[in-house]
Amino acid sequence: RSDKTLQDIVYKLVPGLFKDEMKRRRDFYAAYPMAEVPNGSNEDRGEVSEQDKGNLTDDEIVSLSIEFYEGSSNASPPGPLPLRPQKNGLRFLRCPAAMTVMHLAKFLRNKMDVPSKYKVEVLYEDEPLKEYYTLMDIAYIYPWRR
């Protein structure tokens, strides 16, 4: 039985392997049109592009959206919050895939002039992200499509 997790690890460790494998599968099914893939997915037939798979390189640019989070935490901030974004305060950033969450938080602190007494935390939905995660890690960990 195939192990999808192990296969994904191999694809991530060997550059270009996923693209080559999909090309070989497409070539095979083009040469043998009668060959059927029982219960096969698009990936089994080689019809998944590398972009759909979500493979990223360190130097690729990732577009992400950020918005102010007003969670329901019991701890109140030590004073009035300096950033009260307007309705639909959604912002978009383009960052390298190798950028860490720590650097993203520092960038947001500087860009939004957040005083040092406030903590800037980057979340995915309601889950705080680890500072050492890169945007590429987040794309692999959480459901993400290009």
Image (cartoon, rainbow, N blue to C red):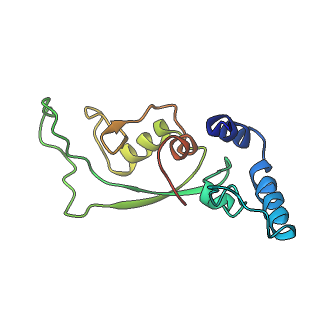
Quadrant assignment, res 74: top left
Instruction: Out of 47 and 115, give the one closest to the viewer.
Output: 47
Total labels: the figure holds 0
The C terminus: image quadrant: bottom right
Q: In this view, does 87 lie to the left or right of 115?
A: left
Q: Nearer the viewer, residue 32 or 72?
A: 32
Instruction: Relative to 119, say whether 17 is above or below.
Output: below
User: Along the horizontal axis of the image, is 7 left or right of 100?
Assistant: right
Q: Quadrant of the N terminus?
A: top right
Residue 82 at x, y percent in the picture: 20, 47
Instruction: Tell whether 29 sits left or right of 136.
Output: right
Name the residue: 12% across, 36% down. 79
- What residue appears at the point 69 percent right and 64 percent down from the top-left corner? 47
Q: In which quarter of the image is residue 91?
A: bottom left
Q: Residue furthest right?
A: 31
Point 78% across, 41% down: residue: 14
The quadrant in which residue 137 appears is top right
Please state which of residues 6 and 78 is positioned toward the viewer in this rendering.
6
Residue 126: x and y, percent? 30, 40
In the foreground, 30 or 130: 30
Residue 17 picture location, percent across and down = 79, 48
